[in-house]
């Protein structure tokens, strides 16, 4: 999959990245002390945030694609836990996390959601993606069906939905969640 401008990826900080970020950061106490001693210009911008380490994963957004023959090389704005971001230029993709490289973040696939039980808490992703919420409800209904024609219908719906949710290059159509909710409403109650 090609990283296009605006896509969110995962970036693994290298030692040089961590050193550059930590070198430019300060603390609120340090700023207050320097202001008292007239060593800090009022209105100056400060970078305040948690210390970072080589190997830390951070979300990043693609801000520049390189040549079509090098789709794995991009410029990134890396989001840090603080008041600043880090500009990571000419970074390569790696399949697995590797220092100084980006990779696609792990995403929750439908079979992982189906493994949840009725009493288990829903992951955050359910509040953000209606299609995942519909799949979760469908899986709960499947568990309640037992062996019946309704089970066959529910499994077929779940299979179709899993394919739609599990492929980020081929997102499901915007009405899939509504169709699944309607189908789920016809199934026996989950308890």
Image (cartoon, grey):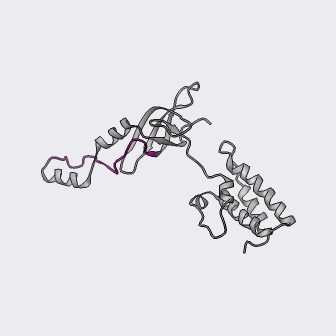
In the picture, measured across the screen, residue 43 lies left or right of residue 133, that is: left
Q: In this picture, which residue range is highlighted in magenta?
A: 39-57
Tell me the quarter of the image containing the C terminus.
bottom right
Q: Residue at x 68, y 48 (%)?
A: 166
Vertical position of residue 186 compared to residue 177: above or below: below
The x and y percentages for residue 154 are 79, 61
Magenta segment: does it hold 41? yes
| Direction bottom: furthest residue | 191
Q: Residue at x 72, y 63 (%)?
A: 139
Rendering quarter of residue 68: top right
In the picture, measured across the screen, residue 10 lies left or right of residue 182, that is: left
**Camera-side residue of 128 and 113:** 113
Vertical position of residue 48 compared to residue 148: above or below: above
**Camera-side residue of 173 and 161:** 161
Q: How many marks?
A: 0
Q: Residue at x 83, y 61 (%)?
A: 153
The x and y percentages for residue 127 are 59, 62
Q: Residue at x 17, y 50 (%)?
A: 34
Vertical position of residue 159 compared to residue 69: above or below: below
In the picture, measured across the screen, residue 46 lies left or right of residue 184, that is: left
Rendering quarter of residue 70: top right
Main secondary structure found in the magenta portion? loop
Tell me the quarter of the image containing the N terminus.
top right
**Camera-side residue of 143 and 86:** 143
The x and y percentages for residue 183 are 79, 63
The x and y percentages for residue 17 are 38, 38
């Amino acid at each position: 999959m090609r990283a296009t401008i605006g896509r969110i990826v995962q970036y693994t900080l290298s030692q040089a990245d961590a050193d550059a970020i930590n070198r430019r950061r300060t603390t609120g106490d340090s700023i207050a002390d320097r202001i008292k001693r007239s060593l800090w210009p009022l209105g100056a911008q400060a970078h305040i945030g948690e210390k970072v380490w080589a190997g830390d994963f951070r979300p990043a957004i693609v801000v520049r694609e390189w040549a079509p023959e090098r789709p794995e090389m991009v410029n990134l704005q890396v989001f840090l836990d603080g008041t600043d971001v880090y500009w990571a230029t000419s970074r390569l993709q790696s399949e697995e996390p590797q220092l100084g490289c980006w990779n696609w973040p792990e995403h929750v696939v439908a079979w992982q959601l189906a493994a949840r039980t009725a009493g288990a808490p829903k992951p955050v992703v359910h509040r953000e993606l209606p299609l995942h919420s519909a799949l979760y409800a469908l899986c709960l209904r499947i568990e309640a069906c037992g062996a019946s024609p309704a089970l066959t219908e529910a499994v077929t719906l779940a299979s179709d939905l899993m394919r739609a949710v599990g492929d980020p290059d081929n997102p499901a159509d915007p009405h899939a969640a509504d169709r699944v909710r309607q189908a789920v409403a016809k199934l026996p109650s989950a308890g």
